[in-house]
Image (spheres, grey):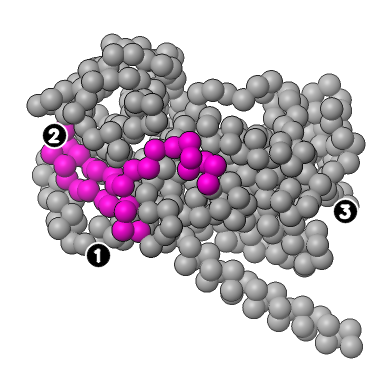
Amino acid sequence: MLPTNTDVLVVGAGPTGLTAALTLARRGVDVTVVDRLDRPPQTSRAAVVHAYTLETLDRIDAGAPLVARGLRSPGFTVRDRDRALLTVPFDTLPSRHAYALMVSQSVTEEVLAGQLAALGVPVLRPYALTGLTPDAAGVVATFAGGATVRARYLVGADGMHSTVRERAGIGFSGPAGGEESFVLADVRLESALPRDRVSLFLARSGPLVWAPLPDGVVRLVAAVAEAPAAPDRAHLQALLDERGPTRRPDRVTEVLWSSRFRIHHRIADTFRSGRVLLAGDAGHVHSPAGGQGMNLGIVDAVDLGDTIADVLAGAPDTLLDAYAARRRPMAEQVVALAARLTRLATLPPAARPARNLLFRLLGTVPPARHRVAMRLSGLHHRDEARGQAAWWSARLAARWNRRDGARG
């Protein structure tokens, strides 16, 4: 049952919302989590948790239980059919998590929800947000059926079609057109590909991601011109025949589930409107190329949860502006990276030899491979985040000192 009041209301119980709530709960904040679905989805898009994300989850004691459920991948390979163009090693990353963790998003959500429940914070379902009324003291959220909750702060973690973002009047801008259609499936197959690393196949018709998961399952994600509502075995086999290995072709033996989705590359105009704040897909959406979306959302969530907890503990409200200023440029970087990977995958045949040569040359230069690994793993954000946090802390301290001096 919904409470009438809470310090923080989190709308959306995907990985981002659960992480934000867990961060707040660990800090002793009264937090309420709602979701419009009556039960958690068992099928989901994301399948990889990168090193920086795991380091961030360690801060809220959620890294280890998730690692225990996943498959550790030591590297990532870019391929053109049978030819490996570039192998990116993760096992040399400067992190205690020197790998990519292959794990279904549904498992990630299960682990986070379990941690949250252990702290006495259940996910309240199904509650569909219909309206927001901000005032000086917080936000009143209205739900279908007429129930209301007053919160001091509200976190919109309700995905790319965010009702929170819409009701808060925050724009969601991106390039005109450019909508992408994707096929998504978990399958069992016969394959000679390594079962411990992700392969990205580049093809003129679009990229194909081949990602191993625990228990012999493989996640397939492919950009297509027009995805069928429920891709079947024949459709998935045709994609592998068209884009995958040729000398020892894969053979799909079972489709566990399949789906489709469409996305635009978009970023919210701001991540803050008064006491309403955005995180995850509510603030940024892009191609799944590179496996960055859920990872960025989880890091958003820990940053935002800590920031709100600091403000509730007495820190200046301007810390929330600092959150918005930090996260939006990082979203821009990830959106740009996903767009570049998609463009590289879909180059016309005449340009493919030059592209393939570039990848092969990158593969012979260890510092170049390391830079790619740092970007894919998200670890390049670690130093950026530290630098930005120090800059904002100094700026806020100076402002606070000036204010205290004026009072004196």
Among the 4 quarters of the image, the one containing residue 247? top left
SS at circle 1:
helix
Task: Determine the residue positioned at 13% across, 25% down.
Answer: 248
Comes first in the chain, label 3 or label 1? 3
Q: Is residue 136 visible?
A: yes
Whole-percent x and y of residue 406? Answer: 85, 85
**Which residue matches tag 2?**
82
Q: Nearer the viewer, residue 4 or 65?
A: 65
Residue type indicated by callout 1: Pro
Quarter of the picture containing the N terminus is: top right
- Name the residue rendered at 25%, 57% in the picture: 369
Determine the residue positioned at 64% across, 78% down: 394
Residue identifier under label 1:
367
Q: Which residue is mark 3?
A: 136
Considering the image in quadrants, where does the C terminus appear? bottom right
- Mark 3 surroundings: few (<14), some (14-19) or many (≥20) residues within 10 A: few
Residue 66 drawn at (x, y percent)? 52, 41
The local crowd at label 1, few if under 14, some if 14 to 19, many if 20 or more residues have their Cα within 10 Å, is few
Please, what is the three-letter code of the amino acid marked with disc 3?
A: Ala
Q: Give the structural element (helix, strand or loop) at label 3.
A: loop
How many marks can you see? Answer: 3
Q: Mark 2 vs mark 3: give the one in front.
A: 2
The magenta span reads: 64-93
Q: Is residue 168 visible?
A: no
Residue 393 versus residue 207 in the image, above or below: below
Residue 345 x/y as whole percent: 25, 39
> Callout 2, which amino acid?
Asp
Query: Where is residue 209 drawn, in percent x and y?
Result: 31, 33
In the rendered structure, the answer to whether residue 67 lies left or right of residue 352 reads right
Q: CA distance from mark 1 to mark 2?
A: 25 Å
Neighbor class of circle 2 (other Cα within 10 Å; few <14, some 14-19, many 20+) is: some
